[in-house]
Image (spheres, helix red, strand yellow):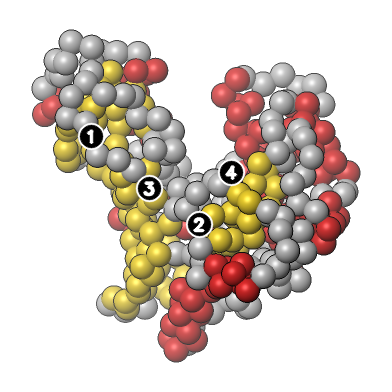
Amino acid sequence: MSEAEMPRAHGAPAVSARFRASPEDFRVEEIDGFEASGSGEHLLLTIEKRSMNTAFAAKRIAQWAGVPELAVGYAGLKDRHAVTRQRFSVHLPKRVAPDLSSLQSDDFRVLASEWHAKKLPRGALAGNRFVLTLRDAEGNRDAIEQRLEAIAARGVPNYFGEQRFGRDGDNVASALAMFGGRRVRREQRTMLLSAARSELFNRVLAKRVGEDRWDAGLEGEVWMLDGSRSVFGPEPWSDALAARLAAFDIHPSGPLWGAGELRSVSASRELEMSALADGNALGLRAGLEAAGLKQERRALRLKPQQLQWRWLQGETLELQFALSPGTYATAVLRELGDIGNASVASP
C-alpha cells in the first residue's frame, strides 16, 4: 500500500512544506528507559551525531574500542539525515576505555559516559523527543494551528512509516519474492519480514481510518495499554472502557501478522480479515506464518506528547513533541499536510 493510498484521519492537508533541508531540521533525542548502574563491564555512551545512521555509529565505536561490532549495543535505530542523540553500550571486560577524545569529531560528540552492568538491548528506551523544522510552509496559519490542536487532542493513526518499506518502497515486493523462494541474506530477511508485517498492519489501519473507526472500539476489539505491549480483551463494551479510551489509557489494536489465531472476534475480526483478503495480502500472511512469527498486536492510535509549535522567521514552522518507542514522526506530519522530504534527493 503506497502512502497515497493511506487515508488521512483529519481531512485534507492543512499545509504544504518541506523538511530535512539540512540535518538540523530533524532533531531526535532518545528518552532513556533506565539509569546507568554505575558499575559493570559495559560503558554507556551518550552520543550526538550528525548525518550518521545508528549502524555506522556502532561500527565507529567498535573500531575505537577495538572490539567486535557485536560488543556494541543500542536501543533503537536512528535516521541518517538528522541530528540525533542516543545511547550506545560497549563491552569492555577490563573496564579500561580508550581516550574518549579520540572518538570525537565535528559530526560525532560524546555527551556522557557511565558504566553499566549489561549490554544495551533493543527497545530499552522510553521514547523519542523530536524537534522538527518545516520550511516554506504554505497555508492559512489559523487552519494549520487548528489542525495541530486537533492532532494534540485526538492523536493520529499509528501507521508504520515509509522507512519500513525501503528507499523505493520495494521491500514488500521483495518479501513476496523471498516467500516464493528467493534467497536473501539473514539481515535482509529480518528487514523484509518487518516490511511484510507493517504492510498488513497499515492495510487494516487504512480501512479503519477510511471508516472513521481508527480511534473507536468495535465489537470484539482487542485493547492495548498505552505505552505498553500488553493487551486485553475482547470484552463487552462498558462505561469504564469508554472512559479509558477517552483518557488515552488504552487504544484499539490491529494485527502484527504471524501464526496462530487472531485474538480479535466479531466485527473487529471481520474488518481485519476483509482488509487482508486480496492475493498479495494472502501471500504475505502465508509467508509470515511459515517464517514462524506469532500473532501480535499494535496500537492503532498514536498521541504525540507535549506537542508544541512556533513560527520562526519567514514561513518556517517548528514542531516539538515526544513519541513512544516504535512509532513514527512522519505519521504526525502526514496528518498535518503534504510535507516533502528534502533529503530524498541527497546522495
* Residues at discs 2 and 1 in contact (Cβ within 8 Å): no
Up-down: is 284 above or below 180? Answer: below
x, y percent for residue 89: 29, 27
Up-down: is 187 above or below 241? Answer: above
Residue drawn at x 81%, y 44% is 281
Up-down: is 182 above or below 314? Answer: above
The residues bearing labels 4 and 3 have C-alpha atoms spaced at a distance of 21 Å
Q: What element does badge 1 sit on?
A: loop
Q: Badge 4 is on which residue? A: 164
Side of 293 where 35 appears, left or right = left
Side of 86 where 101 appears, left or right = left
Kindly identify which numbered label has been placed on residue 126: 3
Q: Earlier in the sequence, mark 4 or mark 1?
A: 1
Q: Earlier in the sequence, mark 3 or mark 1?
A: 1
Disc 4 or disc 1, which is closer to the eye? 1
Q: Would you call the spot at circle 1 few (<14 residues within 10 Å), some (14-19), or many (20 or more)?
A: some
Side of 24 where 268 appears, left or right = right
x, y percent for residue 14: 54, 79
Q: Amino acid at mark 3?
A: Ala
Q: Residue furthest top?
A: 94
The residues bearing labels 2 and 4 have C-alpha atoms spaced at a distance of 22 Å
Q: Badge 2 is on which residue? A: 226
Q: Amino acid at mark 1?
A: Ala
Up-down: is 289 above or below 6? Answer: above
